[in-house]
Amino acid sequence: MKVLLIKDVKTLGKVGEVKEVKDGYGQNFLIAKGFAKHATAEILAQHKEQERLAAENLAKEIASLKELATKLDKAKIVIRKKVGQNGHLFGSITKDEVAHALLEQHSIEIDKKHITDKLSIKSVGEHTLDLKLGHAIHTTLHVEVASE
């Protein structure tokens, strides 16, 4: 019996593989437990279509992330904070503040988890932050910290 694996099976194979197994093992264990489906022509065609759609969606997502990366690389945000007499900020700039300022000033929404730098911006001036957007796409964001 031929089965299409829909979940990884440790001793048999990975998702998407078509394997030849004994009838009892395939019917009573793999299909009954939801690890596989009987590999008919219709099921295989559906699987191919799902793989094609997933590849298309991935390509679209990567293209949109690359476009976002170029926008972020050109963007510059200004954050105003209170400054003490020695020129240091009261507190520091957080990832949440950076994400909020980017949304307000450029209408670009990012998750604060995309900012990979451990933020320790405690002084006035220009700073460059590294952002990891996913799918191995990195970009930089220029932040200017000014005193109120």
Image: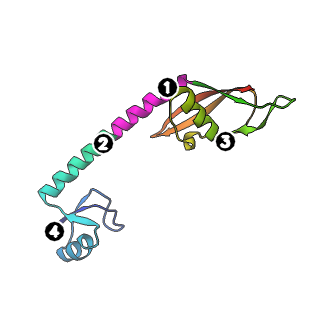
Q: Which residue is outermost to the top?
A: 74
What residue lies at 17% left-to-right and 61% top-to-bottom? 39
Image check: 145 left or right of 73?
right
The magenta span reads 58-75
Q: Secondary structure at mark 3?
A: loop
On the image, the x and y values in percent for residue 131 come to 56, 36
Q: From the top left corner, tell me how far across and down residue 120 is, in percent.
A: 72, 38
Q: CA distance from mark 3 to mark 1?
A: 22 Å
Label 2, on which residue?
A: 55
Q: Main secondary structure of the magenta part?
A: helix
Q: Are marks 4 and 1 in contact (CB under 8 Å)?
A: no
- Left or right for 69, reference 64: right
Secondary structure of the residue carrying numbered label 4: loop
Please tell me which of labels 2 and 3 falls first in the chain: 2
Q: From the viewer's perspective, is 69 left or right of 54? A: right
Tag 1: residue type? Lys
* Residue 65 rendering spot, x and y as whole percentages: 44, 34
Query: Which mark, residue 71?
Result: 1
